[in-house]
Image (cartoon, rainbow, N blue to C red):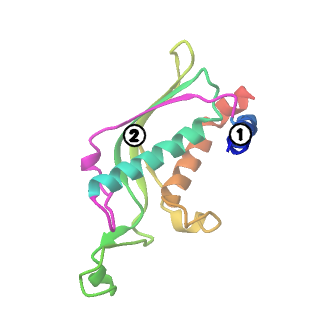
Amino acid sequence: MNKFSTFSCFGLATGVAFLAAFVPTQAAEVKITWEEPESYSDVRPSNESRKRFRERTLKDLEEHIVELASDLPESQVLSMTVTNVDLAGQVWPSQFVGFGNGAGSDVRIIKRIDIPRMTFSYSLSNADGHVILSGDDVKLKDMDFMETNIRRNRTESLSYEKAMLNDWFADNFSTQVAQSK
């Protein structure tokens, strides 16, 4: 039993050291405020409680934004206040779209006209608190989300919304990332 414990600890320590080698040495601090998420246009679940789906969705989006900000210098702070989220597609009762007799769960149907949208304000500040970039009432949308996302992983959760954020981030923060390298 002692051999196993020693091996497990050694393996864990090796794994942590290996992962630490690939963790970015710089990463901006990210502060996201989800303002009144209960009133967002469309964060509707297809088969779970609204609250649990909303929490999971916003957590997933926040983790993605933090991942995007990992290339920014660690001395910078990205603050965002999100005022609306409208996921791609619409949720319909399963019987309305030919999936059962009404006893089943709802279904999210993705059509070209139901584009992903997000409204927020943001600021990127340096270590002294000086605002480098900012935007008020940014209305982010991807009207071409189905065409540009063909090459991307559409099986990933929130792939359309994440692709939209990727494009926005690349358009707005590429200079800060380049300066940090």
Rendered-image quadrant of the C terminus = top right
Q: Which residues are magenta?
A: 24-49
The residue pinned by badge 1 equals: 19
Label 2 to label 1: alpha-carbon separation: 33 Å
Tell me: residue 114, above or below residue 86.
Answer: below
Does the stretch in magenta take in 66? no
Q: Amino acid at mark 2?
A: Phe
Which residue is drawn at the image coordinates 24% and 81% (left, top)?
103
Between discs 2 and 1, the one toward the N terminus? 1
Residue 180 occupies quadrant: top right
Please state which of residues 105 and 42 is positioned toward the viewer in this rendering: 105
Residue 116 occupies quadrant: bottom left
The residue pinned by badge 2 equals: 120
Answer with left or right where residue 153 lies relative to residue 95.
Answer: right
- The crowd level at tag 2 (other Cα within 10 Å; few <14, some 14-19, many 20+) is many
Does the stretch in magenta take in 25? yes
Q: Locate residue 95, reporting x and y percent.
A: 27, 84
